[in-house]
Image: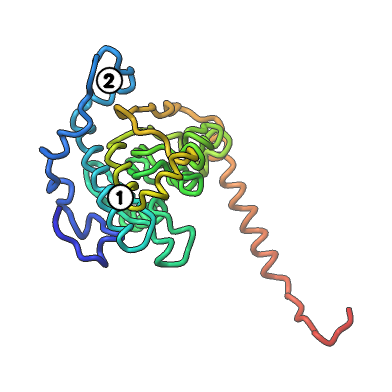
Amino acid sequence: MAAASPKDFLVIHLSDHPSAINELDESAVSKREQPEGDCSQIRMDQMTLMSRPEAYLQDLQMMERCLELAQYGAKKGELPFGAVIVSRGHVIAEATNCVSSESDVTRHAELVALSEAQKVLKRKRLQDCTLYSIVEPCPMCSFPAREARIGRVAFALSSPVMGGYSKWDVLKDDDLSNKLPEVFGQPPEIVSGLLSAQAEQVWRQWNPLVWRFMKRRGCIGSAADLPERHAAVPRPMISWTALAAFLAAPALLVSKAFLHSRAGSRAIPKLDPESDS
């Protein structure tokens, strides 16, 4: 990777580093996550993932970048989280946690990266993007990812207690998109267990004692032998709910305009602090 100054490290996007994805050391990455044992026992979703070598290599490269970001964030006093958003082979945004540095519990790495990606691409919807994270996104991060219609989510370590996929099922809940298609996109493709052993090492190096307690309490899942792919829900050719919303949109606009004009015509009375009424 090209060297980046500390102030650029928290959020780095394509406009700053247009060739970021091409500068990664492919030979170092390709040596990781090699399957061991009887290949006939590999699950079908794992075989499907391996059958796309270019996409799989990109996933490994981007997850390695997440590990680097997590290590950098830990050195700055944050929890070791890192997130990267990629669109069509290009890095759009990347971030560490900013919770401690900004005294804001909502500044998770995934949310910071999502916000930056939308600004860089100048659009709300990120259906052609993949969100990479060292740990499974929590529900707070998963809902905005669904609203942004993120196409893929890949993470190294599962989160059985706080995960937006394995615990609360936000990322794979198709009821969200079925009932509110105007707001939420279809469930994204999930890739779990990428470089999970290396991710565990990052957390262990950060604080061995805290890591031991988190593992004992089941807050972090076990490292996967091989990454697993969970296919996205097929997108229907016609969504009747979305069609109904589209047809109802003009009526809603007229209704909003009428209510706005009606509210503007009414004078708001001033409050008299000395009045008893």
Residue 89 at x, y = what percent?
Answer: 22, 42
- The residue wearing badge 2 is 47
Q: Residue furthest top?
A: 40
Camera-nearest residue between 29 and 154: 29
User: Which residue is depicted at the point 27% across and 40% down?
Assistant: 198
Amino acid of disc 1:
Gln
When asked about the image quadrant of residue 135, the answer is top left
In this image, 52 relative to 45: left or right? left
Colour pattern: rainbow
In this image, 3 relative to 59: left or right? left
Point out which mark residue 98 bears.
Answer: none
Residue 181 at x, y = what percent?
Answer: 52, 38
Q: Is residue 220 above or below residue 255?
A: above
- The residue wearing badge 1 is 205
Residue 213 at x, y = what percent?
Answer: 45, 45
Q: Is residue 201 above or below residue 80?
A: above
User: Which residue is depicted at the point 50% across and 44% down?
Assistant: 139
The image quadrant where one finds the C terminus is bottom right
**Given this view, does label 1 or label 2 mark the residue nearer the observer?**
1
User: Which residue is depicted at the point 26% across and 61% down?
Assistant: 9
Where disc 2 sits, the SS reads: helix
Q: Residues within 10 Å of mark 2 (few under 14, many from 20)?
A: some
Where disc 1 sits, the SS reads: helix
Amino acid of disc 2:
Met
